[in-house]
């Protein structure tokens, strides 16, 4: 257990940050799953913009690695481009 006042404060702030990061990461994963289950190309393209923003935000805050983010974005873009447009 921490003895110094600053260490105790650090533990409290780390816990808040951990929960926030966990929430943002889980939300992004949920949106990715939603995108992967979408069969409509127009809807998928709109969702892709949202998901790209979420992934970029996670990368900026060092929640995920930049190469991991690039791989996810690339694979999602490939998936959306393969979808057939429903007219």
Image (cartoon, grey):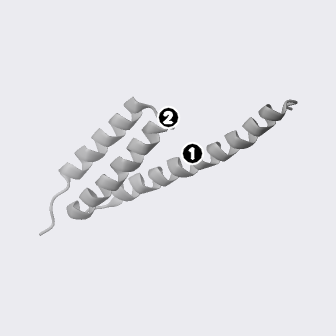
- Please provide percent x and percent y for residue 30: 46, 55
Kindly report the distance in space between the C-alpha atoms of the residues bearing marks 2 and 1: 9 Å
- Please provide percent x and percent y for residue 87: 11, 69
SS under mark 1? helix
Give the residue at the far left of this rendering. Answer: 87
61, 25: nearer the viewer = 61
For mark 2, what is the residue?
A: 62
The mark nearer the N terminus, 2 or 1, is 1
Q: How many marks?
A: 2
- Please provide percent x and percent y for residue 35: 34, 56
- Please provide percent x and percent y for residue 22: 58, 47
For mark 1, what is the residue?
A: 21
70, 39: nearer the viewer = 70
Q: Quadrant of residue 69?
A: top left
Above or below 77: residue 27? below
Q: Residue at x 83, y 34 (%)?
A: 5
42, 11: nearer the viewer = 11
Q: Residue at x 49, y 54 (%)?
A: 27
Would residue 52 appear left or right of 21 to someone viewing this image? left
Above or below 41: residue 13? above
- Rate crowding at label 1 as few (under 14), some (14 to 19) or many (20 or more) other CA atoms within 10 Å: some
Quarter holding the N terminus is top right
């Amino acid at each position: 257990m921490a003895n110094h006042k600053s260490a105790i404060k650090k533990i409290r702030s780390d816990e808040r940050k951990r929960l926030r990061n966990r929430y943002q990461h889980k939300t992004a994963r949920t949106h990715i799953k939603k995108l992967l289950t979408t069969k409509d190309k127009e809807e998928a393209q709109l969702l892709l913009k949202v998901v790209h923003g979420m992934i970029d935000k996670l990368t900026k805050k060092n929640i995920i690695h930049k190469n991991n983010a690039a791989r996810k974005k690339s694979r999602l873009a490939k998936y959306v481009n393969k979808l057939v447009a429903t007219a």
